[in-house]
Image: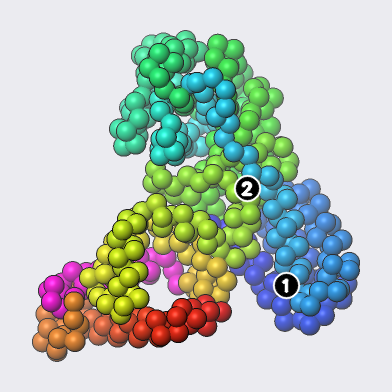
């Protein structure tokens, strides 16, 4: 996510950190580089102009000149102003009489149907009784696609063939109200903001059943065109928020940075992958941190908490503390970590130097290494996983043959595991104080 922009900004920041004092000329040079980076990332030029002006005004003032670390202070200012540009977080409005209707609108191919499934999953895990509504009678198999997604997230899908969308939505709402559902998510047909007939259809739906939220689903990869799309839809119907999809495939980030500032419509959710759990409530501080290469530790923890079994995690932590961590435990951790999502997303959330180092290795190479490690451990006997000391040369050859790897790969894994064990023993002796040396 935002790899190109993050890389350019980090080059600028590295130069600032190396300077003990910053003159106005130093700030101007840095701001020129930041301006170029943002423009190349397809951020709207007026947003760039205003952003740079705000940062420079603060960076050449007393706020920086009196700082103990001027370079770091400028980076903090950039972070603060980026958060301000992204806009305040706007939680989903679930107040009022139930059921609350959420209507998803947008261009064809923007990812509305998948977003509807993700949103249903997101709300269901938070205790809502959700019904999905297939309101797209025009695209072949649109209803079937939504029904498949509904089955995957265990949410019912309402659909009536040969019924116009405004009437269909009204019928769905009545059924949801009678059935005790708390949220109705309507997946509408894809349409251009220039298509007057289909835009009138949306207006008819709104008149029959006023939605609590009307969310525009925007493909982040279309860049500044997303701004025109948002403006066009807003002129036809009131929009309460945005869902930015395919953000994981956007190496530039211009649409995400510009859209709130230009349109005034708040971003409510971002899509960060293809899986149905890859939808995050928008948090500007976290997104700014990722853009600037500072990671998102809180997001990483939340992903881990969602997939790791609490008792199993505590058991492994206890075994780590006692120096009893085995290759079987490592295999369990690898299996659990794969549920957290693609490695590219995990790397994106790592902070500081840890993140920089990880980003120098391609996600594909990381995925291959994880699969290789899991294959090697799976080829061991239970006794070998518990006690790698028994792994003599013949056993290592057998494991390599069984896992489709080389003996060197087996040797490397055993060596890394022993280093991990030694590290854990060191941390145990220091009462955890070694962690500060490890990550500091």
- Answer with left or right where residue 229 lies relative to residue 432: right
Q: Where 62 falls versus 244 (above or below)?
A: below
| Residue 370 in sight in this render | no
Q: Is residue 398 left or right of residue 289?
A: left
- Which color scheme is applied? rainbow
In the rendered view, tell whether residue 55 sits above or below residue 101: below
Q: Which mark is residue 256?
A: 2
Q: Is residue 305 visible?
A: yes
* Residue at 69 percent of width and 25 percent of height: 235
Is-magenta flag for residue 382? yes
- Asked whether the residues under the numbered discs 1 and 2 touch, taking CB atoms below 8 Å apart as contact, a structural biologist would say no
Q: x, y (%) of residue 230? A: 65, 34
Which residue is drawn at the image coordinates 59% and 38% (left, top)?
91
The residue lying toward the viewer, choosing from 267 and 296, is: 296
Mark 1 residue element: helix
Tell me the magenta residue range: 361-385
Single out the mark in the foreground, 1 or 2. 1
Q: Residue at x 65, y 67 (%)?
A: 8
Reading the image, the residue beneath label 1 is 72
Residue situated in front as seen by the camera: 326 or 244: 326
> Is 140 part of what is drawn in magenta?
no
Alpha carbon separation for disc pair 1 and 2:
25 Å
């Amino acid at each position: 996510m935002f790899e190109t922009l993050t890389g350019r900004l980090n080059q600028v920041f590295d130069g600032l950190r190396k300077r003990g004092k910053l003159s106005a000329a130093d700030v101007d040079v840095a701001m020129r580089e930041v301006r170029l980076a943002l423009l190349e990332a397809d951020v709207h030029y007026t947003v760039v102009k205003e952003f740079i002006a705000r940062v420079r005004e603060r960076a050449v003032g007393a706020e920086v000149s009196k700082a103990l670390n001027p370079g770091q202070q400028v980076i903090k200012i950039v972070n603060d102003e980026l958060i301000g540009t992204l806009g305040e977080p706007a939680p989903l409005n679930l107040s009022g009489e139930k059921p609350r209707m959420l209507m998803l609108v947008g261009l064809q191919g923007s990812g509305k149907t998948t977003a509807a499934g993700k949103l249903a999953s997101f709300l269901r895990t938070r205790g809502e009784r959700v019904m999905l509504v297939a309101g797209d009678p025009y695209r072949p198999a649109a209803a079937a696609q939504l029904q498949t997604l509904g089955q995957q997230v265990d949410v019912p899908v309402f659909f009536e063939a040969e019924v116009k969308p405004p009437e269909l939505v009204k019928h769905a709402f009545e059924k949801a109200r009678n059935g005790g559902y708390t949220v109705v998510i309507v997946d509408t047909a894809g349409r251009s903001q220039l298509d007057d007939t289909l835009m009138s259809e949306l207006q008819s739906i709104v008149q029959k059943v006023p939605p609590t939220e009307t969310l525009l689903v925007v493909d982040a990869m279309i860049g500044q065109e997303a701004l025109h799309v948002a403006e066009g839809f807003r002129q036809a119907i009131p929009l309460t928020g945005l869902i930015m999809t395919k953000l994981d495939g956007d190496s530039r980030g211009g649409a995400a940075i510009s859209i709130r500032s230009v349109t005034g419509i708040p971003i409510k959710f971002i899509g960060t992958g293809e899986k149905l759990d890859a939808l995050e409530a928008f948090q500007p501080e976290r997104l700014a941190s990722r853009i600037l290469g500072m990671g998102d530790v809180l997001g990483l923890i939340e992903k881990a908490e969602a997939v790791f079994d609490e008792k199993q995690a505590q058991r492994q932590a206890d075994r780590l503390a006692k120096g009893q961590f085995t290759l079987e435990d490592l295999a369990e951790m690898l299996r659990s970590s794969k549920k957290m999502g693609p490695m590219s997303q995990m790397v994106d959330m790592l902070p500081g130097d840890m993140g920089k180092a990880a980003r120098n290795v391609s996600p594909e190479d990381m995925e291959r290494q994880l699969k290789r490690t899991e294959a090697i451990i799976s080829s061991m006997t239970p006794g070998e996983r518990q006690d790698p000391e028994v792994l003599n040369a013949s056993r290592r050859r057998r494991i390599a043959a069984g896992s489709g790897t080389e003996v060197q790969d087996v040797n490397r894994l055993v060596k890394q595991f022993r280093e991990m064990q030694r590290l854990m023993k060191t941390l145990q002796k220091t009462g955890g104080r070694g962690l500060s040396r490890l990550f500091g």
